[in-house]
Amino acid sequence: MKKIVRVSSDLRSNLVAYLDGELEEDVSRQVEMLLAQSEVARHDVEMLSRSFDLLDMLPREKASDTFTQQTMASVAALDKHIPLVHRRWFGWLQRGLAILLWVTVLGVAGFGGYVVGQQVWPSSSELILEDLPLYENLHLYREIGDVEFLDQLEQRQLEGPLRGEFPDEGNVTEEAQP
């Protein structure tokens, strides 16, 4: 007793194409060789052929002109009602907003870094402002001359610029001279 071998779906689709005359010559020859060797394949071709013959016996309906017009109108209506997320410009808008968001985030981060940098590291102007009292009284310090004069003032314990009290600029020249 011979074992019955089933026909695969790929081979079945080739059999349908063979009946329709759609196969190339070399594939068509392979199918003919299979039909000569396999009883199962011949049976499947016979069943497919009968099915096609029965389909040919059915009455054919012709679509009306209104059917064509209605179909085209419904397709046109579908094109008009495309959701926003499926429209081409919506993708461009999303990309543009993403770029804008990144630019904004980087701008805020840069500004924040600048502000923090200004707080942590003082500028040269701020360092000069810390020494402003020295610069305001620089003319007094230049008149002192050398360190010996400062030592003499310290020994006498005089009140004045050495104790943090600075005279007005108008009286400076008279009091500060040795």
Image: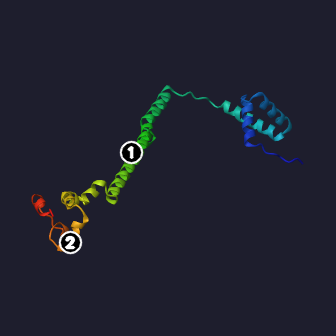
- The residue drawn where x is 20% and y is 70% is 152
The mark that comes first in sequence, 1 or 2, is 1
- Quadrant where the C terminus sits is bottom left
Asked if one can make out residue 83 in the rendered structure from this viewpoint, the answer is no
Q: Residue 156 at what x, y percent from top left?
A: 17, 73
Q: Amino acid at mark 1?
A: Leu
Which quadrant would residue 150 be assigned to in this image?
bottom left
Numbered circles on residues, count? 2
Q: Nearer the viewer, residue 99 or 22?
A: 99
- The residue drawn where x is 34% and y is 53% is 114
With 9 as the anchor, is 73 left or right in this view?
left
Give me the disc on residue 154. Answer: 2
Q: Nearer the viewer, residue 128 or 74?
A: 128
Label 1 packing within 10 angstroms: few (<14), some (14-19), many (20+): few
Q: Amino acid at mark 2?
A: Glu
The residue indicated by pointer 1 is 100
Q: Residue 107 at what x, y percent from top left?
A: 36, 49
